[in-house]
Amino acid sequence: MQASNNISTNGYVVIAGAGPGDADLITIKLQKQLAIADVIISDRLVNPDIISNNASKDVEVFIAGKQAYNDASYTQDEINALIVTHATKGKRVLRLKGGDVAFFSNVLDELYTLLDKDIPFEIIPGITAAAGASAYAGMPLTARGFAQGVQWITFNPSTNYRPEKWRYLAATEDTLVFYMASKNVGYLAELLTRYAPKKNTPIAVIEQATTPYQKVSISTLQKCAADFKDIQFSSPSLVIVGEVVSLHRQFKWFETTARNGSIFKELVK
């Protein structure tokens, strides 16, 4: 089924990435969709300023994000049902996801639901958390001489990678970006150091990236369990492992320029 620009009797759904936090890091295409949406169904990590600055005053807004370790948050089935309920009323529904829709966002469940219900849709990409966090922290993910590539990975205590996988990740010269890993970063580092040829490989945890509250904590694989043991990282946080982390000291423009200058003042108005 191809998406159409016309609203059918089954409505129309736009699934869009809202970027990593900074309300200005959205596409022009998303900005236009925000202005014409009848219903917005938003993840909890989407900056509310994106909606308030761009959406119609008559739009109906639902904050329907999922959250690990929170039984009160929406389930994917509930989110799917919410999308279908409003789309089948003939409304234009905008499903907003933090970051980009293709990176660890469960977009496939929603796409299958739309196909099953014969609801037309389109997808608008956004800036994923890894790109936003690394840029605002001054860590080019594939900097020449520091990394040969980059890998995006999820991690939590139930992640069941085989030893060969950890051996490969520990030895790679790629930058590793771990989503949803900050609560267990010490355990993550422990698994990597079992096989890491260089246990002094830098590791960073970036909290609330691209927002005025961004904070970057840096250590090494060998020392981070001790260095981070008393830190309760706020959500959302991203973990970056690799030599590119060492570039933060030189290129932390957001901390030195934005926070102390006019950009920061604009952000916190």
Image: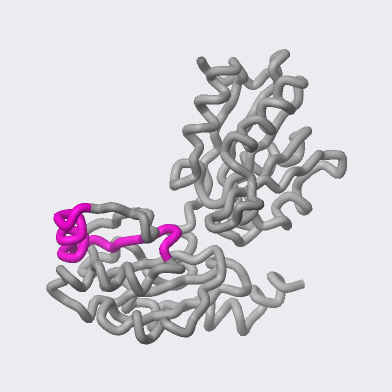
Q: How many marks?
A: 0
Q: Is residue 178 magenta?
A: yes
**Is 222 placed left or right of 86 in the picture?**
left
Give the image location of residue 71, x and y in percent: 61, 52
The region drawn magenta spans 162-181
Between 233 and 18, the residue placed more toward the observer is: 233
Q: Residue at x 78, y 52 (%)?
A: 52
Quadrant in the picture for the C terminus: bottom right
The residue positioned 50% from the left and 44% from the top of the image is 105
- Residue drawn at x 74%, y 35% is 37
Q: Residue furthest right?
A: 58
Residue farthest along the front direction in this orientation: 71
* Residue 63 in view in this figure: yes
Asked if residue 226 is among those painted magenta in the image, a careful observer would answer no
Up/down of 130 relative to 29, above or below: below
> Which image quadrant for residue 250?
bottom left
For the point 72% across and 40% down, which residue is it?
40
Is residue 190 or residue 218 the one in the foreground? 190
